[in-house]
Image (cartoon, rainbow, N blue to C red):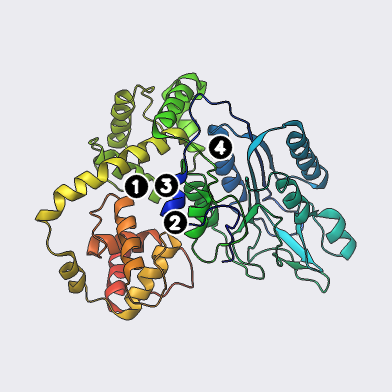
Amino acid sequence: MEIEMKRLAPFGLAALASFAFMAPGAAAAADLALVIGNQDYQNAPDAVSARADTRAVADALAEHGYEVTLGTDLDRAEMRGRIAEFAARLDRDEAVDRVVVFYSGHTLTSGGINYLAPVDQGNDTLVEVMMDGVPLDLVLRLAGQEPGEAVVFIDGAQLSGFTAKAFAEPGLADIEAPDGVLVVSAAAPDRAIPRRSTGQSVFGRQVVDRFLAPGVRVSTAARDLRSPTWATGDTDSRLVLMPETTGRVRDRVEADTREDPDAAAPDQGAAVEQRLDLTKAERQTIQQNLTTLGYDTRGVEGIFGPGTRSALRRWQRANDLRQTGYLTSAQVALLNQQAVAKRPADTDEAQPTQPDPADTEAALELSRADRLSIEQRLSVLGFAPGQQDGSFDASTRRAIANYQRSRGHGATGYLDRQTVTAIMQETRDASDDIVEGAEALLNILRSLDN
């Protein structure tokens, strides 16, 4: 990962302590975003997950007040039209606070130049490659009009793309970011990765959950990137893409829910929730969050049955929201914030009655291969375990504790069977590159299959 945060204060507690959010009543300049997802290609395999990622990113940005220029499955003319529209908005607004660009789809590189591919992109000739595609440099230069306030996300390094030719190859070559622009890619140049066949990609989730989380600095999110995600360039180390406080998030949730006609009735609320495309793991997290807050879902199995719907209605009533029993994306964010705020106190109270966590982990008899597998799986799930070498250091302990806390388990930083089983279950289909482990983990895998 190549990152330079050289414009202002470096990473660290001093820099974090110096930042203050904009006062709620202060006049805000425009926040602009360009979001493009091309999935249904005519001359290459589909870029699976592109539409789901684009929808999730665009929804998150719009909920926080961004003016989003959005396009999915764009051909050459449409893609250039959307980019021209975005450029016109940049020129129109004299004061721009933040600029976000997100592209998911195929890319091509020829002669060291990177091209974003529309759905009708051709690559049979050099003319097609260079005249059909949109140069990535164009998008970077547009973002560079707001130095220090711009982040560009690129998911174009997929394994299954255009056929390589003598004059062009799929994927990305080296990226030279303009001054003041941070570029975050799903993988480093010249590296290709698989996409998920359903739902959001790992990269798409990382963008929404980390970079677009309320109050999180871009510098912090970039510092904690997990492989193979890669970043280059520089930006203002104090930049926060979503400068929201908990109170303002709650106000937004309440206002959006009351004004959104889709949330007015349960059948319409179901359609809104369906568009969130929640995975089983995300549903389990929601159920665990409700349980943490005292709303019994009658199980944490990832299935939203009558128990979960009843718990949701009780939670919505307690928060003065419409009692539909179905969630909007803003409500998911609020629910998670409330649960995270409550868990530390619950954990501290429970710790004295627990056995020694180190003894519990030792009883698992994990081999070095088991530990390496756990480190790799934590990395896939977005919890940076440090060096992946089969040895649990301070970084690994911190990653384990963060995982446990996020899933509503006791955040000890040590493994128990519940934590290991949950990690294994969530990463069964994550990647072929993950070490399966030795006897201890293989036994757990076999138990999951039964």
Q: Residues within 10 Å of mark 2 (few under 14, many from 20)?
A: few
Q: Residues within 10 Å of mark 4 (few under 14, many from 20)?
A: some
- Locate residue 413: give its quadrant: bottom left
**Amino acid under disc 1:** Gln
**The N terminus is located in which quarter?**
bottom right
Q: Nearer the viewer, residue 311 or 250?
A: 250
Dot 2 and dot 3 residues touching (CB under 8 Å): no
* SS at badge 1: helix
* Picture layout, residue 35 above or below residue 184: above
Could you tell me how far apart the alpha carbons at marks 1 and 2 are, in whole angstroms?
34 Å
| Residue at which label 3 appears | 17
| Residue at which label 1 appears | 284
Q: Position of residue 429 (x, y in %)?
A: 45, 63
- Residue in the picture at 77% in, 39% down: 87
- Locate residue 192: give its quadrant: bottom right
Q: Nearer the viewer, residue 188 or 181?
A: 181
Could you tell me how far apart the alpha carbons at marks 3 and 1 are, in whole angstroms?
34 Å
- Residue in the picture at 65% in, 64% down: 160
* Picture layout, residue 375 above or below residue 304: below
* SS at badge 2: loop
Left/right of residue 358 with respect to residue 303 in the rendered view: left
* SS at badge 4: helix
